[in-house]
Amino acid sequence: MIEIIQPGMLASVQDLGRHGHRSLGIHPGGALNALALSSANLLVGNPADAAGIEITMGVCEIRFRRDTRIAIGGDDIGALLDGKPLPACWSIPVRAGSTLKLALATPDSPEQPPRHSMRTYLAVAGGVDVPLVLGSRSTDLKAGFGGHQGRALRRGDKLPIGDATQAAAAVHGPAFGMRSPRWSGLALREDENSRQVTLRVLPGPEFDQFTNASKAALWSHAWRVTPNSNRMGYRLEGAELKRKHGRDMLSHGVVPGVIQVPPSGQPIILMGDAQTTGGYPKIGVVIGADMWKLAQAPLNASLRLEACDLQAALAAAQEQQRYLDSIRDTVAALDWSRATLYRK
Amino acid sequence: MQGPQIHPLGDSALLCSLPAPATLAQQQRIWALAALAARWEEVGEVVPGMNNLTLIARRPVADLDILTQRINQAWPKLGGAQSEGRDIEIPVVYGGAGGPDLESVARHTKLSIDDIISRHSAGQYVVYFIGFMPGFAYMGGLAPELATPRHTTPRVSIPAGSVGIGGEQTGIYPMASPGGWQLLGRTSLPLFDPAQDPPTLLRPGDRVRFTVERVEQ
């Protein structure tokens, strides 16, 4: 069991989402940075889609009430396990009574280099064992079901841990690490010093309905992530995007990554908790392989949108899959019996 | 009947939309295509919209053209497909605390409150699609004289079961949420229960009637 000592701004149980129910209005939700949760899960011997905890902007404290193995994915934002730094993508056994603390994500503070620091994922061997609801353990924060009692985690919450596949070995085996996606080549397109994130975008169905000036602005402007951004959508601020005509559209299905342009002309990129249907024109769609970067982009970060084609999108998805496969293969080849116990 | 226009929606979805206007006959073809496409191996989910259908692939699709071809081949053969919709009666307590906007709808439509209730409960509505939130049904069939614009400032929280009018549509809020619709009454029928299978009372194609359980002052 794990106990939430301090949930921080927003922490919730998430897996890779609740799929198959969109025609009933149920959004997929799930970890916004699926790459981070998947890699952390694989590192502790879980299937990629086990449930973990998504922690937003840190200031979180979690105590482990039994021996287990953990890994964090996403940004470590100064994670301390019993006072010792714990980098992301590090798989480590923990003893009952150990405490994980995550600092505040402060991209501007002098102690912390500028970095992408919105979300951190905690995976535990065996996964967070809340009940499956409609095929998923994700918390639907809007509709109030799934996860732990259908809500964000609170101080004092106690979450059961499932049985780990390689329980004893996984818990007591050696600590080891992998290159995090930030350093693995998947993130080479980001310029960390300018805190600018580049997202690859496919033109949306209504791209050609926008004025030429707006189409050009989409690619040439820097877009600021406004503080109104959340698990439903990232609201951007920049140039005003205008359509050639103001014709109304009928509601249609939307997916995470869709860049819709409401009448204000300021685009919104839909995230996992967005409603399943919408009626705003779609100027573009962020490719699936870049959605994790957006999930990590801090508020006020500057985004660049870069046109790409389907072939590039598929190559990026395959590259990401190879990264996850490499973790899975490494963990499968581990000799868990070489036990070197982590001690406080 | 003209076939759908097909647009890629990112690297793993396709949006198929039909030429305007939206009609029940077109929507029935959309449901038929949805039922067929849901059985295709590479399709993970189908999402009917108003006069359109979104197909969501299980993974990024190497060749969206192949899916496009299958849709175009299937479309002409879908004629006459009937929806599997059911007849559902929804008892409504009109007015009172659950229907705070009966008077504003009366002012806008220049109808009496009794007229509004009898016309709203006389209609037969068809669920075109579910969106916005779990179980929220977009229904066609509202008597045109009842159409009333949404509130300019949405309410912060509307109770679950609230029955209202938004423009030319009528619908029910399955759970507490913010919302701008004109509220006529409330039903105590549960519209969304994640423990049930299926979890929503209403599904695309269902035919809905509102019955007057009671009218409150």
Image (cartoon, rainbow, N blue to C red):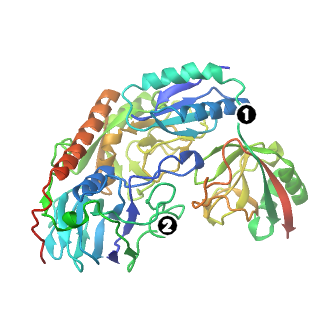
Can you give x and y, in whole percent of width and height, for residue A5 in the image?
Answer: 32, 79
Chain of residue at mark 2: A
The type of residue carrying mark 1 is Leu
Q: Residue under circle 2?
A: A150
Report the Cα–Cα distance between label 1 and label 2: 37 Å
Q: Nearer the viewer, mark 1 or mark 2?
A: 2
Give the residue displayed 13% in from the left and 62% down from the top.
A337
Can you give x and y, in whole percent of width and height, for residue A34 in the image?
Answer: 33, 51
Give the residue displayed 70% in from the left and 41% down from the top.
B205
Of B163 and B55, nearer the camera is B55
Give SS at disc 2: loop
- Left or right of B173, for residue B8: left
Q: Residue under circle 1?
A: B24
Q: Residues within 10 Å of mark 2 (few under 14, many from 20)?
A: some
Of A199 and A148, nearer the camera is A148
Chain of residue at mark 1: B
Give SS at disc 1: helix
